[in-house]
Amino acid sequence: MPGAPIGVFDSGVGGLTVVRELLWRLPHESLLYLADTAHVPYGPRDPDELRGFALGITQWLAEQGCKLVVMACNTSSALALDAARRLVDVPVLGVIEGGVRGAAAVVRDGAVAVLATAATVRSFAYPTALRALRPGLEVHQAACPDFVPLVEAGRLGTPDAYSAVCDYLDQLPLADLDALVLGCTHYPFLAPGIRMKAAEHTHLVDPAVETAKAVKRLLAERGLAGSGPARHRLVATGSTESVERIKATCFGGSLPRPERVEPLTWPACEAR
Ligand code: DGL
């Protein structure tokens, strides 16, 4: 079991921001990453459909022998984490807890804003968890539907990307923010533009950092830590193009070429 891979998934390339943290912090662990590119973007979809995708993928990763599943997707974590934990015998971690912990560590007497998909914003998962930890905290949310298509298309440092960043961040009281949570795993790829637009004193919180620390702790606690050599695998349920592009620009030779697998879904009636 310690030599088994960690399963990681997202709708597309966003979860690779979590993979990046895992590669840094856990260099001896093998990773099996699934990009559900047949269904990207998740943000505008119906919650039941999204739960079906998350459970189908979690089940598949467990069947592949993964010792742990990381939902490297805020939308799936907001809607399907509890159901996924009931479905499989291996531990399942989401990313929202990491985002909340990261924000709570830097917030003083100011507010927090969460940038996320429309589905995550509608779930209120972040404001609920943040206020459970810090009652009375001022929390703002902004849905950013243009970000995921920009990142999937590899248009990261473009004028379009910066103008989308400005459109969404202008809705927020930027001067009042102690923390700005990148509440979708695609968004850290746009962090340079978000950093330019945010106030200087505002901390950008990438949930991947605390999530990777939580993975490390959990593996150690359960005696599941691997000792290498790490062997990684990337799979995509639809086009592999976006994964290949990001892999080439951000990961070089540290990840293999993505392979195609069939789209994985779980019957909607069982997803509840
Ligand atoms: N990267 C995912 C998230 O963290 C999903 C984005 C999408 O496909 O809309 O929410």
Image: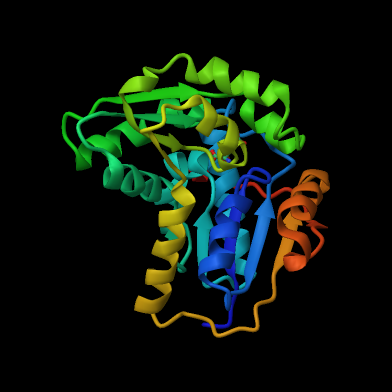
* Residue 248 x %, y %: 80, 54
- Seen from the viewer's position, the closer of residues 123 and 226 is 226
- Seen from the viewer's position, the closer of residues 145 and 205 is 205
Query: Is the residue 31 above or below the residue 224 in the image?
Result: above
* Residue 160 x %, y %: 71, 21
In the image, ligand 1 is in what quadrant?
Answer: top right
Residue 62 in view, yes or no: no
Q: How is the image coloured?
A: rainbow
Kindly identify the residue that appears in the image at 70 percent across and 33 percent down. Answer: 157
- Seen from the viewer's position, the closer of residues 77 and 173 is 173
Kindly identify the residue that appears in the image at 68 percent across and 44 percent down. Answer: 12
* Residue 229 x %, y %: 65, 83
Using the rendered view, name the quadrant where residue 32 is placed. Answer: bottom right
Using the rendered view, name the quadrant where residue 186 is placed. Answer: top right
Tally of numbered tags: 0
* Residue 72 x %, y %: 54, 51
Q: Residue most toward the front? A: 200
Quarter of the figure that contains the C terminus: top left
Kindly identify the residue that appears in the image at 58 percent across and 83 percent down. Answer: 3
Query: Is the residue 212 above or below the residue 156 in the image?
Result: below
Query: Is the residue 260 above or below the residue 206 in the image?
Result: below
Residue 233 in view, yes or no: yes
